[in-house]
Image (cartoon, rainbow, N blue to C red):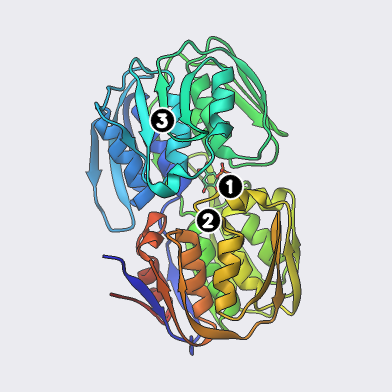
Amino acid sequence: MTRKILIRPQKTPLRGTITVPGDKSISHRAIMLASIAEGTSIIRDWLPAGDTIATLEGFQAMGVPIAVDKKSHQAWDLTIEGQGLRGLKSPGKPINCKNAGTFIRLVAGIMAGQTFTSILDGSDQLRKRPMARITDPLSDMGVNIESTDGKAPLTVSPSTIQSIHYEMTVASAQVKSAVLLAGLFAKGETTIIEAGPSRDHTERMLSAMGVDIQWGDGTVQMAPPISLKPLDLTVPSDPSSAAFPIVAATIVPHSEITLNGVGMNETRTGILSMLESMGAQISVANKREAGREWVADVTVKFDELHTTAVSGGTVVRGIDELPIWSVAATQAAGDSTVSDAQELRVKEVDRISILAGELRKLGVQISEKPDGFTVSGPSRLYSAEVDSHDDHRLGMSLAVAGLVTHGMTLIHDANCVEDSFPGFVESMQALGAEMEWVE
Ligand code: S3P
């Protein structure tokens, strides 16, 4: 059943301390890499969301024993028996990647090293997303990979994989990771020249697993390993999920909230840079290292926001947070602009035109350009019914906008928020937000 989220105008400040669920990018990678390690991996606080459960079920179907301790609806502990680099078994049917772009693009690299042919498929939404960005470099490496007119389903057959020196044309961690994962099975070194500072979770995890990999200054170099050591990992809270309560606290007057244990990897903190440049009061405390990633406790206090212009590396470091950033921009006086963000057009949906269309229904002044948009604030937001278009980040962004509308907001087609943030509504309620699920 498709549920809706109902939001009432927020009359009281948001207050309190919560922990948002685990990082989606790290949770996908932990399943994939632990499955091809030698030995038993322990993953704590793994994210049980729609996208990552697709990955878990996909690897179980390929013969990987995964014991699941369902601690809560927001965090599972996993024990994964690695099958070795080439030890996966044919699932005997297509692998269903559902809505998960990270799953299909990264697993393509792993399937190239297996001894059977696999078909990678997913939802209608996933079937619309571009796959040539991975099939091109993988083909250059000698991977037998076929797409359907540059889209999923993909067919990957056993391959003899060559080393590659690859200059990326898009700043994409999924593309970089697909090449690195195929590179695990290559006859020689993999070298990648990046087009921008995309997230480096694959590099960090491979390094923790004993792989000879170096990265920094836009270059990644990796030698193919003989085997991967198992992981012992606690997944940090996802900064992309933290962004929703963070922005909510910057726009609901007199709010003050703290989020514990948020991932602080510099390739992921673009949203903090964007909000700080708007004058938001954000303090980061107790910074510590956990599983080769940095985490910290983040406190946000309401204050007046100014406009800003976002472009370049900051866009790459906060690509998934631009929809929720646009909600903060509605409350700043003047024009806030994002440029260099054409990648937003090939996410779960075209996040520029769909976002603009839904925000306009709430009374926001927003104009589109090919590589971004401009929000002219401050906007007085009106009561409206809006639609997530089955995009989790749009659904949550609209729900946060609903807190500052003058009337009730109803988000249709809202189940998708659980693709990345199980318990989103409950976490927001814990901070005092006036939102609830309705049938
Ligand atoms: C991700 C990389 C990003 C991001 C996506 C998750 C990852 O996509 O938008 O939500 O886990 O590697 P691109 O690689 O397409 O930029």
Q: Residue furthest front?
A: 149
SS for dot 2: helix
Asked if marks 3 and 2 touch (Cβ < 8 Å), the reply is no
The response on whether ligand 1 sits within 8 Å of label 1 is no
> Above or below — where is 49 with respect to 30?
below
| Residue type, label 3 | Leu
Q: Position of residue 395 (x, y in %)?
A: 46, 66
Q: If the image is split into quadrants, where does the N terminus sit?
A: bottom left
Q: x, y percentage for residue 336? A: 73, 69
Left or right of 376, for residue 9: left
- Give me the C-alpha separation between circle 2 and circle 1: 9 Å
Whereabouts is ligand 1, in terms of quadrant?
A: top right
Q: Is residue 315 left or right of residue 59?
A: right
**Label 1 near label 3: C-beta < 8 Å?**
no
**Neighbourhood count class around disc 1 (C-alpha, 10 Å): few under 14, some 14–19, many 20 upward:** some
Mark 3 neighbour density, 10 Å: few (under 14) some (14–19) many (20 or more): many
**Mark number for residue 239?**
2
Q: Which badge, 2 or 1, is on the more N-terminal residue? A: 2
Mark 3 or mark 2: name the one nearer the start of the chain: 3
Secondary structure at badge 3 equals helix
Residue that carries the numbered disc 1 in the rendered image: 265
Tag 2 near tag 1, CB within 8 Å: yes
Q: Quadrant of the C terminus?
A: bottom left
Residue type (three-letter) at the residue carrying disc 1: Asn
Mark found first going from the N terminus, 3 or 1: 3
Res. 33 mark: 3
Q: Nearer the viewer, residue 255 or 357?
A: 357
